[in-house]
Amino acid sequence: MKKVVRGFYSIAYSVKLCRPDVIAAYPITPQTEIVENLAKMYADGELGNCEYVTAESEFGAASILVGASATGARTFTATCSQGLILMSEVLINAAGMRLPIVLVNTNRALSAPLSIWNDHQDSMILRDAGLMQIYVETNQEAHDMVPVAFKVAENPKVMLPFMINMDGYKLTHAYEPIDLLDQEVVDSFLPPYDPPVYMTTKNPLTFGCYAPPNYYAEFRVVLQNAMERAEKELEKAYKEWAEITGRDWGGHVVTEGVEDAELIAIAMGSLTGMVRNVVSELRNQGKKVGLLKIRTFRPFPAKEIKEILKDVEKILVFERAVSFGYEGPVGMEVKSACFGLTPEFYSFAVGLGGRDVPGEEVMKIINEVYDGKVKQGFHFGTVKPFEEVVV
Amino acid sequence: MVMKITLGGVSKPHSSKTMKTGDWGTEYPVVDEEKCTACKTCEYLCPDACIVVVEKEDGKKVAVPDYDYCKGCGVCFSVCPAGAIKMELKEIYKLEVC
Amino acid sequence: MSYFGPGHGACPGCGLTIATRNVLEALEGKCFVANSTGCLEIVSSQYGRSAWGVPYIHSLFENTGAVAAGIDLALKALKRKDEGKVIVLAGDGATADIGIGPLSGMFDRNHDVIYICLDNEAYQNTGNQQSGLTPPGSNTTTTPVGELLPGKVGRKKDMVSIAVAHGVAYVATASVAFHADIRRKVRKAAEIEGAKYIQIHTPCVTGWGIDGKQTILSARLAYETALYPIIEYENGELTRVRKIKERKPVEEYLKIQRRFRHLFKHPRGKEIISMLQKIADENAAKFNLDV
Ligand SMILES: Cc1ncc(C[n+]2csc(CCOP(=O)(O)OP(=O)(O)O)c2C)c(N)n1
Ligand code: SF4
Ligand code: SF4
Ligand code: SF4
Ligand SMILES: [Mg+2]
């Protein structure tokens, strides 16, 4: 059933079809409309047995889900930016406790200065948290990835929190014709949650232990192993989804024109569309450029990326965040994946805090890198001339 | 035996029983069975759940400390309304001072 | 009584474990425990050495009110409410300081949770730092006694009023000095739907500088001096208090504890002692404690 809806609705609707047991959330722009829609569905009695609560904070919302998930409930929340960072202590804890909480992060910049607009600084800071992270390009993809997220998070071989990243405003507030899923399709793909362990008086287990040094390291190895298994299980789920729905979003990465490319441009999220357009225009002009879209960021598909980049001369990463004091985080990951290869490497932080990224800018960056006109390494995209002063 | 790492660190109930804390204290409680009225005050107040009123063969109920876990804290001694508990110094602490 | 311990690692004579055992006993083990980071958690939940005989979860220091709310919601959604009551066991620091936001949220949304604050009057797990529930005059490592300062100068936060102000249907204080009273209050709380708050005075041998033989004595003296009134509120009304036969001067309570010993020689000691006596007198008057 195709319907023109906004991004936040496509998420809320998909969450409903996943039959969650507990939703806890807290409003923050531009995520608010996701939970408002869920709240309305709850008020209208459309969420079945699900309990929906607005918590006292994002920290509280995530903590509620820790208790609920450990009790055996399917759990969902959505947040971004300041809210995600406020949740971070809890999410890191949930990963260690192996609780399959699913969240949607509507990527937004971090304060200061305060900004409600989009970049990837928020989710990048949670890179090491033990959450699976994917980045979606369109609202249909976002809609489709919610059942996938639950399926993989709750897979007994995985049991990890799952964060779907969708660009704030650019996707959340955009109208797109969305093929809204049918309940039967989701039911056939996503079985009810069957937790391997959960809190019950019938078998009174202890959750959330502390581990002295003679145990702690092994738990971290196990977390890493779970991420490694997640790489396979997620890939399988992507495939199964494509078979069931006929919509194939690709695997961990998607490529276009990389086979003969001298330059491969790398992007994540909604910016990919723009980069794709520019790349295909340049190919039409006879330039040997290709596109690598990264969908799965954690677990990081390093081997696949290295294989794709193994013969390329130039790598160009479009970043939406900065690791201050070094460079862009995606570029760092790509470089480490390419260890042993010797391509030229460039990365550009663009679109920070919602700054528009016009096609001409992408075109200019790719052309300049292609033509050898810029230094290797990390750069910021277009910024206006300024002078640093105290007041 | 190879170490087991459970999902999320889940632990089995009462697995602390392997920690025998009976050697922590310097003192240990001795119950005077004649004086004990089996009132259970000690049982409710022992921080280590290791003194329990039990029925003996002769039918008399008395408080019995479990020295495998007793830390010799003296809570039971301090609360016994019948004055039925004495704390005694463990043999190994009865050192001669030269 | 087999819902907690033995084999846990608490100091000999620890008040927390006494309270915990009586809480679980009152519910006959039919409960879910959410516990904050702190002494009780550390001594009972080492990997593979759990002292718990009931379903138990520890997440963080400051989120236990919310974790318990989540358990409550899950039990509702999964139609498993009959399995048992949801209880929180949290330290005074977790309750009155760092976790007061999630606690307030839990109260406000009126989850079916018995929130029990185990009040040992400081951050004991980390070595006796002051909390909002540390009483004035207490020598803690972050309110140390010095040439100028006589230990903590601020007051003990009134969590009972904070709970009552949230409209919590049942709010009570209790003490390990009265074990049957703990069980009665927990059972009573269990019969009431919605959020409940019980604050139990639980002496800490290490932080207070007492001997295990004085654990119950010190708790009793806190009550007998009216420094720790034992009271009950139902639907906002004070419904019951434990009367004091012959109220004792606060010095009797203070002098047996190392954390207050300096008050008897510090230049500002007298001032603090009379402040504490004034608090006790006010408690006695406010709750009509004297017989
Ligand atoms: C966010 C955070 N800050 C600080 C700590 C360190 N910490 C752990 S337990 C604790 C004190 C606990 O005090 P309380 O809640 O009174 O419990 P008690 O140990 O006294 O029973 C502190 C400061 C922590 N674990 N997490
Ligand atoms: S001395 Fe302490 S630990 Fe031992 S039985 Fe008595 S109260 Fe329990
Ligand atoms: S408190 Fe004393 S009288 Fe009562 S059961 Fe224990 S030992 Fe016996
Ligand atoms: S430090 Fe105090 S509260 Fe902590 S275990 Fe020891 S006696 Fe109990
Ligand atoms: Mg404390």
Image (tube, coloured by chain):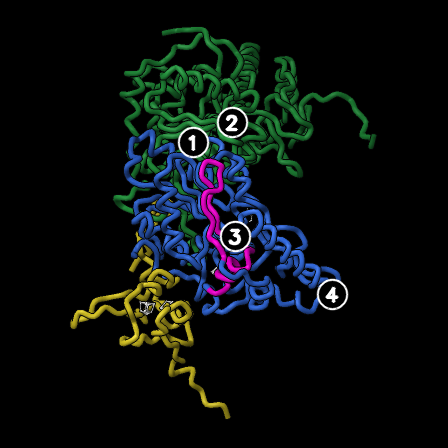
Chain colours: A green, B yellow, C blue
* Residue at horizontal 55 percent and vertical 23 percent from the top: A265
Q: State the extent of the magenta-drawn residues as a range.
A: C217-244
In the displayed structure image, the side of residue C209 where residue A250 appears, left or right: left
Which residue is drawn at the image coordinates 40% and 80% (left, top)? Answer: B89
How far separated are the C-alphas under marks 3 and 4? Answer: 31 Å
CB contact under 8 Å: marks 1 and 2:
no
Q: Which residue is mark 1?
A: A162
Q: Separation of disc 1 and disc 2 at Cα? A: 18 Å
Examine the structure image and report whether residue C236 is included in the region drawn in magenta. Answer: yes
Labels 3 and 4 share a subunit: yes
Query: Are tags 2 and 3 found on a single chain?
Result: no
Residue designated by label 2: A26
Q: Residues within 10 Å of mark 2 (few under 14, many from 20)?
A: many
SS under mark 3: loop
Spatial CA span between label 2 and label 3: 44 Å
What amino acid is found at the position of numbered circle 1 in the picture?
Answer: Phe
Is residue C1 left or right of C64 when viewed as pictured? Answer: left
The 10 Å Cα crowd at callout 1, few under 14, some 14 to 19, many 20 or more, is: many
